[in-house]
Amino acid sequence: METKSLNSVVLISAICNLSSDIPLSSEEQSTFEEFIKKTPELNELAVNRDMLLRWAAYQLDVDKKWQQFQNEYADCLQLDSRPETSRRIWPMAIKIISIVASAIIMINIVFYSLLLSGKHPQPDITAAVHKATLVLANNEVISLETLPAGYVIQQGNTRIVKQDSSVLSVERTAGATSYEAPLYNQLLVPRGSMFSLKLPDGSVVDLNAETSISFPSTFSSRNREVVLEKGEACFNIWHDPSNPFIVSGNGIRYKVLGTIFTIRAYNRDTLNKATLIKGALEISTGCSKVLLHPGQQAVVHPNKSISVISNVNTSNLLAWKTGEFFFENDNLRSIMAEAESWYNIKATFKDHVDAKGIVFQKISRNVPVDQFMNILSMEEKAFHYEIRQNDDMTEVVISK
């Protein structure tokens, strides 16, 4: 029997075995136990619940795992080339391999499903929730999570409405005019949170953790402008050719007519980045100016010069909006900076840990920090970690 045929036989057998028990003779049981000893990961998975969750969160690729299995146990998969005495154990080998394949598939299905359904155990350090602070023009400070959905704050002829747990809307009332002097408010999104802001013209800004934006209570007929003070945001701008939308911040001016784009301008980053998803975007710094096309990213350097990167994978840059981390050739220190913002933790590096890049990794932002670290440590073998609970902060200590 060829390996390809065996592959199909074992996979079909494994799937069938998911719903039934497979009795083993004493000889088969002994052989199976010997097999497990040679495959420590299966033994760990069988007895260690934390490991099960870790593997599930890692979203095992069954096809990849099967290929690894074939490579590691090629001798078992080529019994037909052995003497007749070896071929006699073929039925038993099929049964044993079927059980192992079943275990791999079952672990994926059951525990990955639990993660998707939110039924995994609740950890001490969970992912972000929807929190934000609104600072009104009169310096009144309002914690939005304490307000019920539908709560209205009247500001002149403008209504600021908490639409639901994650959206704040700025609406002009019937008596508002385009000649009113706007009042400037500030929306602060803390660590471990996300929030959305719907502006008076219908434009929507999605704000990532540790982001602050200043916005007017109303837009005039000649001016639509907001200030991104720090952080990361995705802008979906209402099209109005006669009145360009302006985003300013850090000495940079972004001018659009109607488009979708992102800006990343965290204080911890030495470079500011703007990426265009749709439309057209003009970026100027006083000494440089560029016009971006969809799929391009502008990188603003400390000296305010601008370089342009083409063919950017925009869907990966928007992973935070869809509830995922996406890392590609990112070093461990930059990854942990993301984790600090999302989980509200402190990352401490010891022993001069090699911060080489994570080649490729997607992780759900819904997993708790311990599973997040488990997944990273499975890909990047050059570090160990320990989660410590201090009085006022949770610390993740990373060492060799």
Image: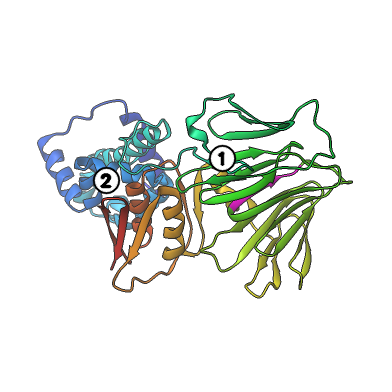
Q: Main secondary structure of the magenta part?
A: strand
Is label 2 in a helix, a strand or a loop? helix
Taking depth in this image into account, of 278 and 62 the one nearest to the observer is: 278
Quick check: 309 left or right of 286?
left
- Amino acid type assigned to the residue bearing label 1 in the image: Glu
Count up the numbered dots: 2
Is label 1 in a helix, a strand or a loop? loop
Residue under label 1: 140
Q: Is residue 235 magenta?
A: yes
* The C terminus sits in image quarter: bottom left
Is residue 2 at all visible to an observer of this figure?
no
Give the mark nearest the N terminus, 2 or 1: 2
Q: Position of residue 303 (x, y in %)?
A: 66, 75
Q: Is residue 187 magenta?
A: no
Quick check: 61 left or right of 323?
left
Q: Residue at x 12, y 43 (%)?
A: 30
Residue under label 2: 51
Image vertical order of residue 200 relative to residue 235, above or below:
above
Residue contact between numbered discs 2 and 1, judged by CB atoms under 8 Å: no
- Amino acid type assigned to the residue bearing label 2 in the image: Met
Range drawn in magenta: 232-237
Image vertical order of residue 311 relative to residue 203, above or below:
below
